[in-house]
Amino acid sequence: MVAHPRAPARSHRLRPLREPRPIAVEADGEGRPAAVTLSGRRLRVLQVQDTWRIDDEWWRERPVSRVYYEVALEDGRTPIVYRNLVTDGWFKQAY
């Protein structure tokens, strides 16, 4: 059975998909990731493949200010991690 397409959305049934997860990151002297811990295993960052920054919603109580890094790890994975510049925490972005 499918809901009527013009029925109002119920916000209690909505949830964000693939929320970022906190992650342990060791940064180098420039603040870039040098190692990350995934599944309890410390992995060296072999290369930072891409970097970008997002600053948004500066007028809100909780603005968004992040620096993203796409990194190549020693086990071959290439996750995207970011540093939240407001809270100074590190997160792994899932897609």
Image (cartoon, rainbow, N blue to C red):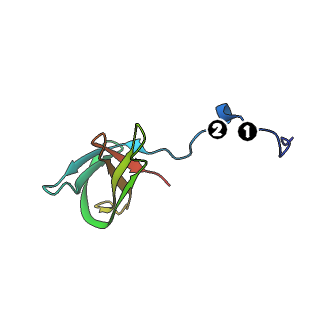
Q: Tell me which residue sits at (83%, 41%) in the image.
A: 3
Q: Tell me which residue sits at (20%, 51%) in the image.
A: 27
Image mark for residue 81:
none
Left or right: residue 32 versus residue 14 is left
* Residue 13: % across, % down: 67, 34
Q: Does the CB distance between marks 2 and 1 fall below 8 Å? A: yes
* Residue 70: % across, % down: 35, 62
Q: Residues within 10 Å of mark 1 (few under 14, many from 20)?
A: few
Q: Upstream in the sequence, badge 2 or badge 1? A: 1
Task: Pick whichever, 84 or 21, lies toward us.
Answer: 84
Q: Which residue is mark 1?
A: 9
Disc 2 residue type?
Answer: Leu
Q: Secondary structure at mark 1?
A: loop
Q: Tell me which residue sits at (32%, 41%) in the image.
A: 40
Q: Secondary structure at mark 2?
A: loop
Q: Nearer the viewer, mark 2 or mark 1?
A: 1
The quadrant where residue 1 appears? top right
Q: Which residue is mark 2?
A: 14
Q: Is residue 72 above or below residue 18?
A: below
Task: Pick whichever, 55 or 71, lies toward us.
Answer: 55
* Residue 47: % across, % down: 26, 66
* Residue 26: % across, % down: 21, 48
Disc 1 residue type?
Answer: Ala
Left or right: residue 22 versus residue 17 is left
The quadrant where residue 7 appears? top right
The Cα–Cα distance between marks 2 and 1, rounded to whole angstroms, is 9 Å
Q: Is residue 91 above or below residue 46?
A: above
Task: Pick whichever, 37 or 61, lies toward us.
Answer: 61
